[in-house]
Image (tube, rainbow, N blue to C red):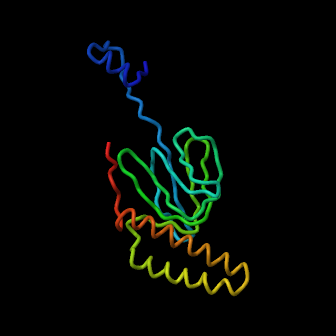
């Protein structure tokens, strides 16, 4: 007989010798985050939140299959009491049948990899490039704007984490 946690608690005081008590773990998502350069991370999670072209979405176990275009922004991966933040750029976010999530991103960096001073310098260069691109064509301007958006996402994630590491959520 398979028992849920509440059934097992009720019968744990006097289980029958023929009963096996099996505790069912809550389901988890499995995920892989890949860029052209590397596998950034993979593992299991309770939820994954990402910025898409339609707004922010959060995926939980048993989510329907989904394919979405990602925007530059923050990705949050929660597993138990731990939360990992990443700065991601454009790419594809796919939820597959069975709770598997695949992220194919142009860039993705864990918060502990980000350095505020370097990002501030890159953000300044991107702002200057945007001003210069206004004098050129629309393609140059769009490219400069996308670069600035990517740097702003990195900056926000770096500031949230104060340069990093995983945090434990208050219960």
Q: Is residue 85 above or below residue 57?
A: below
Q: Position of residue 56 (x, y in %)?
A: 56, 53
Which residue is more in the foreground, 119 or 98? Answer: 119
- The residue drawn where x is 58% and y is 68% is 106
Which residue is more in the foreground, 49 or 127? Answer: 127
Quadrant of res 107: bottom right
Quadrant of res 14: top left
- The residue drawn where x is 41% and y is 30% is 24
Q: Position of residue 102 (x, y in %)?
A: 57, 54
Q: Quadrant of the C terminus?
A: top left
Q: Is residue 24 above or below residue 3?
A: below
Which residue is more in the foreground, 127 or 10? Answer: 127
Q: Position of residue 65 (x, y in %)?
A: 64, 44
Q: Is residue 61 above or below residue 38?
A: above
Which residue is more in the foreground, 99 or 79? Answer: 79
Q: Is residue 20 above or below residue 147?
A: above
- The residue drawn where x is 32% and y is 21% is 9
The reply, left or right, for residue 121 in relation to residue 68 is left
Q: Position of residue 161 (x, y in %)?
A: 37, 63
């Amino acid at each position: 007989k398979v028992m849920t946690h509440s059934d097992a608690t009720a019968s744990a005081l006097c289980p029958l010798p023929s009963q096996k008590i099996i505790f069912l773990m809550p389901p988890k998502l499995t995920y892989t985050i890949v860029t052209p350069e590397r596998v950034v991370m993979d593992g299991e999670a309770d939820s994954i939140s990402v910025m898409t072209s339609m707004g922010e979405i959060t995926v939980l176990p048993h989510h329907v299959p989904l394919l979405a275009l990602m925007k530059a922004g923050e990705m949050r991966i929660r597993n138990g009491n731990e939360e990992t933040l990443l700065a991601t750029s454009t790419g594809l976010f796919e939820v597959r049948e069975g709770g598997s999530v695949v992220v194919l991103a142009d860039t993705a960096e864990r918060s502990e990899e980000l350095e505020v001073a370097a990002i501030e310098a890159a953000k300044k260069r991107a702002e200057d490039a945007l001003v210069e691109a206004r004098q050129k064509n629309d393609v140059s301007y769009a490219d400069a704007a996308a670069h600035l958006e990517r740097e702003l996402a990195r900056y926000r994630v770096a500031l949230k984490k104060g340069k990093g590491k995983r945090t434990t959520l208050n219960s």
